[in-house]
C-alpha cells in the first residue's frame, strides 16, 4: 500500500496535460502584491515550510483577488510537503478530509488551509481498471494524487485561479497565462472546456459566480458549452450544490449571479421553479428586491441568514401551491403548512437544503398571515416571537414587491416604534376601521381568505 502510494507520488508518467503549461516568473516590481498584504498566519506557514526545505506558495483566490485590488476571503497555501510533513512542522495543525486530504494549520483564532500539490488521476491501466476515475458522465471521482507544482496549476479550474505567489522571493509563478487574463479581466477555463466541466460540473456555477464577483468576462470558448452542459449538474451530490449555491448567494453579487444563471440556463438544477417565479412580475420583483438587499447587507458586513434567503427564493413557489390547495377547498393554515412541506421536500431532494434550516424557513412562512391579524393581543404575541424580526423583514419585502398593501408595512413599522399608549391607539384605529368586515368574516370563517386582517385562524393552534 505504502509502496504503491510512493510510486504514484514519485514515478508517475508525464501527463499529456503538462504540455499546455509554460512557466513565467513575474518579479516583484512587475506586479502589485506586497508582502504586508498577505495574512500573517499564511505568511508564517509558507515561510516556515520554505525554511524546512519545501516549496510553499500562497495560491488560488487570494493571489487573484489581491491582483484585482479586492480583499481576499481566505489565504490558502500550497506546498510539495505531504500532509504528514506539514502536520509535523506545525504543532497546532490537523489533517482533514478523506478523499481530499489537506492540513488545517491554526494560528491564534485563525485557520489556514495547506494543501499538497495535486496531479492528474492515475493514468496507468492497472489503477484505472480497478478503481473507476470518472462516472459515466466524465465526472472525476478522485482528486487525491500528489503531483508537481505544474500539475497542480493545470488541475485548477480557471487560469486566474492558478497563480502561485512566493512570499519570500515576492514573485508570482504563472504556468497558464493567468496574469495576463487578470489584466484583461478574462475568465478562462484551463484545458478543454467540455472535458473540464464534465470532470466537475460545479465549475459551470463557479464560472458564473466568479465572473459576477470579479467583474470579469467569461471567455467565449469557456462560455460556449455552459448551456448545453447544464444537465450535468444533476449528477453533482446535492450537498456540494448547496454549498456552491450558498457561496453564490452570499457573494455580495447574488442578484447578478441569479440573472446570469438564468440567462445561461443553469438555474434548473438549483431552484427548479426559479424560471417560473422570475417570469411572474410579482415573483421577479420580490426576488430582485430581496437579493439587492442581501448584496447591500453583505457589502456593509451585516449578517445574512441562509434560512431567510431560502425562504425568499422559495416563497412564490409556496404561494402558488398554497393557492392551488385553497382553491381545492383546503383551509388556509393547513394549506399553507402543506404547501411549505411540498416545496421543502422537493428542495431537499434537489439542493439538499440541510434540515437545520427548515425550522427557520417554515417559521418565517407560517408567521406571514399573522401580520394581517391586527386586533386584540395578536400583534403583541407576534412581537414576542423569537423569529419576529426575520418574519417582519420578510413581510416588508412582500409589501415592497407589491404582493401586500404598503399600508400593512407602514402600520407595523409604526407599531414597532410606538410606546404602549400609541400602540393601543394604533390597535383601536384598526378595530374601528375593520368592524364591519370582521362581522362578515365571522359568519363564514372557513371561506375567509388569509389576507383578511381578522382571519380567525390562529396558526399556533394548528
Ligand atoms: P472564493 O473567493 O470564492 O474563495 P476561490 O477561487 O478562492 O474563490 P475556493 O473554493 O476557495 O475558491 O478554491 C480555492 C482554489 O481551489 C481556487 O482558486 C482554484 O484554484 C481551486 N479550485 C476550487 N474549486 C475548484 C474546482 N471545482 N476545480 C478545480 N479547481 C478548483
Ligand atoms: Mg478561496
Image (cartoon, helix red, strand yellow):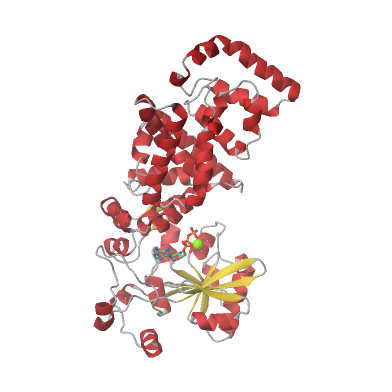
411 relative to 285 in the view: left or right: right
Q: Nearer the viewer, residue 159 or 196?
A: 196
Residue 55 in view of the camera: no
In the image, residue 77 lies at what x, y percent? 53, 72
Can you tell which quarter of the image residue 99 is in?
A: bottom left
Q: Nearer the viewer, residue 69 or 432?
A: 432
In the image, residue 37 lies at what x, y percent? 61, 65
Residue 330 in view of the camera: yes
Q: Nearer the viewer, residue 390 or 356?
A: 356
> Looking at the image, which residue is at 41% across and 36% down?
339
In the image, residue 17 lies at what x, y percent? 31, 74
Q: Nearer the viewer, residue 100 or 33?
A: 100
Can you tell which quarter of the image residue 3 is in?
A: bottom left
In the image, residue 15 lies at what x, y percent? 30, 79
Q: Is residue 336 above or below residue 230?
A: above
> What is the quadrant of the N terminus in the image?
bottom left
- View extreme (top): residue: 436
The image quadrant where one finds ligand 1 is bottom left
Can you tell which quarter of the image residue 449 is in?
A: top left
Amino acid at each position: 500500500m505504502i509502496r504503491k502510494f510512493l510510486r504514484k507520488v514519485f514515478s508517475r508518467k508525464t501527463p499529456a496535460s503538462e504540455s499546455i503549461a509554460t512557466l513565467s516568473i513575474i518579479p516583484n516590481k512587475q506586479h502589485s502584491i506586497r508582502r504586508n498584504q498577505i495574512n500573517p498566519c499564511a505568511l508564517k506557514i509558507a515561510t516556515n515550510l520554505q525554511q524546512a526545505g519545501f516549496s510553499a506558495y500562497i495560491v488560488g483566490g487570494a493571489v487573484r483577488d489581491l491582483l484585482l485590488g479586492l480583499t481576499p476571503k481566505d489565504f490558502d497555501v500550497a506546498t510539495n510537503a505531504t500532509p504528514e510533513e506539514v502536520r509535523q512542522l506545525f504543532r497546532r495543525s490537523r489533517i482533514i478530509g478523506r478523499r481530499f486530504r489537506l492540513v488545517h494549520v491554526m494560528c491564534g483564532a485563525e485557520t489556514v488551509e495547506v494543501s499538497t500539490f495535486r496531479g492528474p488521476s492515475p493514468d496507468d491501466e492497472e489503477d484505472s481498471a480497478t478503481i473507476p476515475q470518472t462516472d459515466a458522465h466524465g465526472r472525476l471521482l478522485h482528486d487525491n494524487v500528489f503531483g508537481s507544482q505544474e500539475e497542480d496549476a493545470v488541475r485548477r479550474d480557471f487560469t486566474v485561479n492558478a497563480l502561485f505567489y512566493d512570499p519570500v522571493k515576492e514573485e508570482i509563478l504563472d504556468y497558464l497565462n493567468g496574469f495576463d487574463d487578470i489584466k484583461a479581466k478574462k475568465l478562462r477555463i484551463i484545458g478543454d472546456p467540455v472535458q473540464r466541466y464534465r470532470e466537475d460540473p460545479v465549475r459551470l456555477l463557479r464560472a458564473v459566480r466568479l465572473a459576477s464577483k470579479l467583474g470579469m468576462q467569461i471567455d467565449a470558448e469557456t462560455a460556449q458549452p455552459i448551456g448545453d452542459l447544464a444537465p450535468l449538474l444533476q449528477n453533482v451530490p446535492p450537498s456540494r450544490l448547496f454549498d456552491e449555491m450558498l457561496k453564490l448567494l452570499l457573494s455580495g453579487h447574488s442578484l447578478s449571479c441569479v440573472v446570469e444563471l438564468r440567462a445561461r440556463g443553469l438555474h434548473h438544477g438549483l431552484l427548479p421553479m426559479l424560471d417560473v417565479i422570475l417570469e411572474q412580475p410579482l415573483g421577479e420583483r420580490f426576488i430582485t428586491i430581496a437579493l439587492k438587499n442581501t448584496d447591500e447587507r453583505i457589502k456593509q458586513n451585516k449578517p445574512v441568514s441562509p434560512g431567510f434567503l431560502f425562504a425568499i427564493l422559495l416563497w412564490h413557489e409556496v404561494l402558488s401551491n398554497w393557492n392551488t390547495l385553497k382553491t381545492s377547498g383546503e383551509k388556509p393554515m393547513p394549506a399553507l403548512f402543506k404547501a411549505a412541506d411540498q416545496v421543502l421536500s422537493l428542495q431537499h431532494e434537489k439542493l439538499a437544503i440541510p434540515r437545520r434550516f427548515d425550522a427557520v424557513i417554515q417559521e418565517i412562512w407560517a408567521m406571514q398571515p399573522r401580520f394581517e391579524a391586527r386586533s386584540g393581543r395578536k400583534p403583541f404575541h407576534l412581537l414576542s416571537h423569537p423569529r419576529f424580526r426575520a418574519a417582519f423583514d420578510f413581510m416588508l419585502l412582500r409589501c415592497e414587491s407589491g404582493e401586500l398593501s404598503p399600508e400593512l408595512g407602514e402600520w407595523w413599522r409604526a407599531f414597532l416604534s410606538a410606546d404602549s399608549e400609541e400602540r393601543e391607539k394604533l390597535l383601536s384605529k384598526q378595530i374601528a376601521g375593520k368592524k364591519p368586515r370582521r362581522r362578515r368574516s365571522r359568519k363564514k370563517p372557513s371561506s375567509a381568505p388569509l389576507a383578511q386582517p381578522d382571519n380567525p385562524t390562529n396558526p399556533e393552534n394548528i
